[in-house]
Amino acid sequence: MLRRLARLVTLGQRLPDDIVSPSLSPGQRQRFHACRDRRSRHEITPVPRPGGLAACLSAHAKVASEKNMTLKIASDIANAAVQACTAKGYNVTAAVMDRAGGVRTILRTDKAGPHTLDSARRKAYTAASTKRSNTEMLENVQKSPAAQYLPMIDGFLVVSGGVPVKVGDEVIGAVGVGGAPGGHLDEQCANAGLEVVEDQLK
C-alpha cells in the first residue's frame, strides 16, 4: 500500500488525508507526509524520476544493526578457558554462545565428564539470557523471593561458571564452563577466556 501511494504522488497526484490515513500505520503516515511535503517544496511541476517518493520513504526505514559473537572470538574464549582450567588440573568443558543463545563453539577436554557438556551450555545460556554472571544471578535468587523461580526456566542453570561477553555495555554472548571442583573455579576459567579477547572486544 505504501509503495502504491508513493507512486501516485510521484506522478503528481496529491491524495487527501482521508484516503491516506486509513491505509497506513501512524509511523508510515508520518513518513509519507514528510516526504510528500519535501517534494512540494522543491518541485513546482511534478516530474516522475527514478526512486522518487518511494526512495524518500525507504530512506526512513531503518534496519537494526547489532554486534554479535564471531566464531573466532568464541573459539579464542573457549580455548583460553579450557587451557586455564587444564593448567590447574581441572577437566572441563567450555561453551560459548551468541547473544540469541545459539551455540558458537563447545570445547571439552579428553577426560571431562559427559555431564559437563550440558552444564557448560546451560551456564552460558543463563548468562546470555540474563546479561549478567551466574554468580550475580545466584546471589539474587538467594536474596530475593521474587527471583526464586528463575532456576525453573527451561535451559537455565543458576550455578557459578557462566559469564556474559560484552563489547562496551552491549552483551554479545556468554561463556559457560563446567567440570571444575566448584562453580567459582569454573568462573575463574571463564574470565580467563575473556581476558584473552579483550582487544578484540573494543
Image (tube, grey):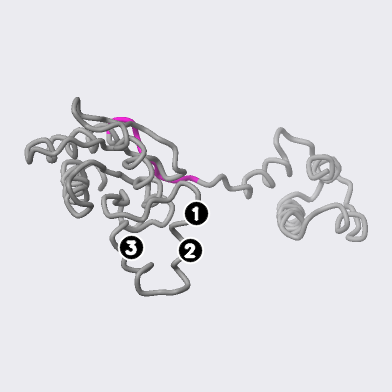
Res 173 visible: no
Please tell me the numbered disc located at residue 153.
Answer: 1
Quote the CA–CA distance across marks 3 and 2. Answer: 11 Å
Q: Are marks 2 and 1 in contact (CB under 8 Å)?
A: yes
Q: Is 89 situated above or below 152?
A: above
Residue nearer the viewer, 31 or 134: 134
Q: Position of residue 42 (x, y in %)?
A: 71, 52
Decide which of tag 3 and tag 1 comes sooner along the chain: 3
Could you say where residue 63 lies in the image, as x and y percent from the top left?
Answer: 56, 44
The residue beneath circle 3 is 138
Q: Overall secondary structure of the magenta stretch? A: loop
In the shown orientation, is residue 129 left or right of residue 163? Answer: right
Tell me the amino acid under the disc marked 1.
Ile
Q: Which residue shows up at 31% across the image and 67% down it? A: 139
* Residue 28 quadrant: bottom right
Q: Earlier in the sequence, mark 3 or mark 2?
A: 3
Which residue corresponds to mark 2?
149
- Label 2: few (<14), some or many (≥20) within 10 Å? few
Q: Residue at x 30, y 44 (%)?
A: 175
Q: Secondary structure at mark 1?
A: loop
Q: Residue at x 66, y 43 (%)?
A: 58
76 in the magenta segment? no
- Residue drawn where x is 34% and y is 34% of the image: 70
* Magenta part of the chain: 65-72
